Amino acid sequence: PDVFNILLQVLDDGRLTDGQGRTVDFKNTVVIMTSNLGSDVIQDKHNESQYDEMKNAVMGVVGQHFRPEFINRVGDIVVFHPLGKEQIKSIAKIQLASLRSRLAEKGYKLTLSGAAMDKLAEAGFDPVFGARPLKRAIQVHIENPLAQQLLAGHLLPESTIRIDVDGDELTVVNQ
């Protein structure tokens, strides 16, 4: 409740005063807040034809969790469609770019088979939490096995490292 009172001050007055009397100006600030409220509703009504129904249901959940004076100070509430497998793969590619860059500095090239990308997307997606588990899935299924292989000397410098699927597991192959 105290956090919402502070946010009310920011949204209403455009300023924030701390416990020591210092004031911060928020008049030229855009405040963006996110929430998983209504994510179960979004999963149930995720096709385009049900968007208005989904948004109304989510707004009902929002109304149950936040006081009217808080909701009335929010300029707009955007309800996003749930992420699909293709969006998760795109996010995975973005997150893998930094790993590829780090490996390139050491002289390695990283590739993933289509099956490996599908497996990673499956491991890194949760209908409620969206793509949040993806970073952890990359760490557990790709970075950790890669680090073990590198430390053991199994990956040759200046080589291509291919991530593939063997059975139900992601595997590291030196090419």
Image (spheres, helix red, strand yellow):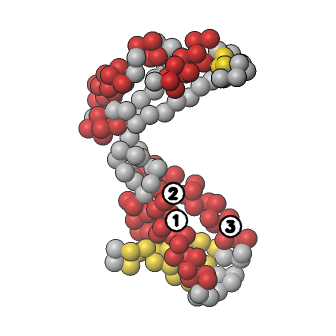
Mark number displayed over residue 108: none
Badge 1 marks a residue whose secondary structure is helix
According to the picture, the residue beneath numbered tag 3 turns out to be 102
Kindly report the distance in space between the C-alpha atoms of the residues bearing marks 3 and 2: 16 Å
At x 43% / y 73%, what residue is drawn?
Answer: 170
Badge 3 marks a residue whose secondary structure is helix
Q: Is residue 6 above or below residue 154?
A: above
Q: Nearer the viewer, residue 99 or 118?
A: 99
At x 40% / y 36%, what residue is drawn?
Answer: 36
In the image, what residue type sits under mark 2? Lys
Label 1 environment density (alpha carbons within 10 Å; few <14, some 14–19, many ≥20): some
Q: Residue furthest left?
A: 44
- Where residue 37 sits in the image (x, y, percent)? 37, 33
Label 3 environment density (alpha carbons within 10 Å; few <14, some 14–19, many ≥20): few
Label 2 environment density (alpha carbons within 10 Å; few <14, some 14–19, many ≥20): some
According to the picture, the residue beneath numbered tag 1 turns out to be 139
Q: Nearer the viewer, residue 64 or 142?
A: 64
Q: Is residue 171 above or below residue 95?
A: below
CB within 8 Å, label 3 to label 2:
no
Badge 2 marks a residue whose secondary structure is helix
At x 40% / y 46%, what residue is drawn?
Answer: 129
- Where residue 89 sits in the image (x, y, percent)? 47, 55
Please identify the quarter of the rendering in which residue 44 is found: top left
Mark number displayed over residue 135: 2
Marked residue nearer the N-terminal end (3 or 2): 3
User: Which quadrant, please, contains the C terminus?
Assistant: bottom right
- Where residue 120 sits in the image (x, y, percent)? 43, 63
In the image, what residue type sits under mark 3? Arg
Kindly report the distance in space between the C-alpha atoms of the residues bearing marks 3 and 1: 14 Å
Q: Nearer the viewer, residue 169 or 73?
A: 73
CB within 8 Å, label 2 to label 1:
yes
At x 46% / y 78%, what residue is drawn?
Answer: 171
